[in-house]
Image: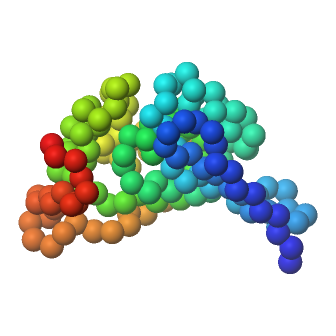
């Protein structure tokens, strides 16, 4: 069997929005994936890049993988998801308190203040995607809460800026 492979980093400013496709030669549709979808750039830069990508696919992403919940990795999801079917959504299993800290830090860190969509995403990441995509077949959470009381504790990594 022979396969055609494509991988692209989309130029959308500081952050990450990448996609790829694998197609067996002769097959009609490729296996299409997106890895992260965000930027700290102004919406006027990010939105057209995401919309251009959507015009090139068949309204389906077989795999949507979010590496972590920083604003510059998820801020484009509001543009990506409407009208798109998602096969598998992969998200890190991040405790509620960690997501709250991310939201608080983002409001300080970025001059273009993360808006309501980012805070809605942090409140319920899987629910955010399920509520905006046309459909999602399965959700996979990677990792687990720390042992103890279900993730109520949070230790900042040593390289984190002070709150």
35 or 111, nearer to the observer: 111
Q: Position of residue 32 (x, y in %)?
A: 68, 55
- Is residue 92 rendered to the left or right of residue 134? left
What percent of the width, then of the height, locates residue 120? 32, 35
Q: Is residue 24 above or below residue 72?
A: below
Work out which quarter of the rendered image holds the N terminus and state it.
Answer: bottom right
Q: How is the image coloured?
A: rainbow
Q: Residue at x 72, y 43 (%)?
A: 57
Q: Nearer the viewer, residue 104 or 91?
A: 104
Front-most of 139 and 24?
Answer: 24
Look at 75% across and 40% down and name the residue there: 56
Q: Residue at x 82, y 69 (%)?
A: 3
Which residue lies at the image location 15% right of the left edge and 60% below the top edge? 155
At which x and y percent is residue 25? 88, 66
Residue furthest top in the image: 44
In the image, residue 99 sits, relative to residue 146, either above or below, namely: above
- Name the quarter where the C terminus is drawn: top left
């Amino acid at each position: 069997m022979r396969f055609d492979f494509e991988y692209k980093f989309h130029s959308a400013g500081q952050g990450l929005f990448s996609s790829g496709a694998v197609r067996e030669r002769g097959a009609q549709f490729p296996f299409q994936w997106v890895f992260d979808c965000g930027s700290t750039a102004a919406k006027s830069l990010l939105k057209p890049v995401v919309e251009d990508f959507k015009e090139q696919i068949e309204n389906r992403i077989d795999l949507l993988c979010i590496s972590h919940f920083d604003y510059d990795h998820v801020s484009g999801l509001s543009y990506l998801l409407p009208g798109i079917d998602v096969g598998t959504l992969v998200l890190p299993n991040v405790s509620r308190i960690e997501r709250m800290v991310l939201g608080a830090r983002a409001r300080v860190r970025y001059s273009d203040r993360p808006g309501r969509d980012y805070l809605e995403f942090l409140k319920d990441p899987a629910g955010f995607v399920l509520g905006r995509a046309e459909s999602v077949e399965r959700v996979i959470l990677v990792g687990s809460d720390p042992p103890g009381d279900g993730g109520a504790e949070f230790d900042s990594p040593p390289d984190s800026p002070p709150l």
